[in-house]
Image (cartoon, grey):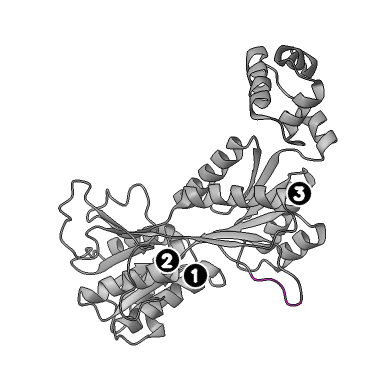
Amino acid sequence: MATMVDVAAHAGVSVATVSHVLNDTRPVLPHTRQAVLDAIDALGYTPNTLARSLVTARTRSIGLAVSAISNPYFTEILQGVEAGALEHGYGLLLADPHDDPQHERKVVQLLHERRVDGLIVAPSADPDALLRYLGQHNVPTVFLDRLVEAPAGHPFRFDQVCTENAEPMAQLVGHLAERGHRRIGLVAGLPGLSTTNERISGYRHGLAGAGLPYDERLVAHGDSEATAAERATDALLSLAAPPTALVTGNNAMTIGVLRALRERDLSVPDDLALCCFDDFAWADLFAPRLTAISQPSKEIGTQAVRLLLERLASPDHPARTVRLPCAFVHRTSCGCAEPPRTSGATHTDLSQKSPAKGSLS
């Protein structure tokens, strides 16, 4: 088995230079670095990760705590995190907090005890215990998808990455209003999540922009999962004056909404128009095809890795929040005719779209 000494001899450099290339402990000239990498490849050298971590106090591993891993949205985020980590030579340890604050605190501690260099976390609706632990132990952490606020009286040292939520939701509501709908219901996510709060805010803003009143009876919480969304939809449809159109807060809840409509033998969009926040692979296969907001989920993951690595390199850098734009995917569940394009959908980058009257700026 090849050793660092063998790599150094093959590349014509010192063992210390090989160590600097492997551990990023000192700048190395590009041609020298490439010579070392070529030698590693030629000899099939495998670094001793344990020994390296003892020297550098780094394990070159990242902990990822994300709930609902079976959700295609978070699965794609995971793919983005994994790709970003591997690109920079980091391994990944994965845990599912199940959106439970106590379990979240426990799994984050377990990841930290395994000496990961940093954490990427999609926080629960009540992250106070999580924030206390991360702050007490000074764990480099990036929050993704859901934003958190600093506890009162404490500095905020965590970077965050998410998408725009309010404006895309307002776009969906505005589109349905343009189709003539005056009672537009919302199946909202789990209370307390920043995504839920921002999408409700966007829903209200979309109504205001269309000159429609806000009616709290038209908002039901589906708790970000299918079964609760099915119950929420049933409650909305049982109103004396039910909605003629629905907007869902995420893709899992869209499935619950569709189940509820099937149970009532209601057709989309003939009986009720439907738009959803979150596009997913099979949204284009439904009949009708689902009009949706598409989030750049893989990019969220890769951006989270980038922020974490930059935090590791510069621990005192001011905390940053990165928001990524979404795209409006226009299909037919909203009641519009089939788009003429062969793909069956048109995509509008909302970051490039000029705000409509009454929209968020």
* Extent of the magenta region: 149-153
State the image coordinates of residue 42 (x, y, percent, origin top left): 63, 13
Is residue 51 shown above or below 308? above
Is residue 218 shown above or below 119? below
Is residue 32 shown above or below 42? below
Please rate how many residues cluster around mark 1, counting C-alpha atoms within 10 Å: few if below 14, some from 14 to 19, many from 20: many
Q: Earlier in the sequence, mark 3 or mark 1?
A: 3
In whole angstroms, how far apart are the C-alphas of marks 2 and 3? 32 Å
Specify the amino acid type for callout 1: Thr
Q: Does the CB distance between marks 2 and 1 fall below 8 Å?
A: yes
Specify the amino acid type for callout 3: His
Q: Which residue is mark 2?
A: 249
In whole angstroms, how far apart are the C-alphas of marks 3 and 1? 28 Å
State the image coordinates of residue 145 (x, y, percent, origin top left): 54, 59
- Say whether residue 148 is left or right of residue 77: right
Quarter occupied by residue 212:
bottom left
Quadrant position of the N terminus in the picture: top right
Residue shown at 35% from the left, 62% from the top: 352
Question: Foreground residue, 360 or 250?
Answer: 360
Q: Earlier in the sequence, mark 2 or mark 3?
A: 3
SS state under label 1: helix
Residue 112: numbered disc: 3
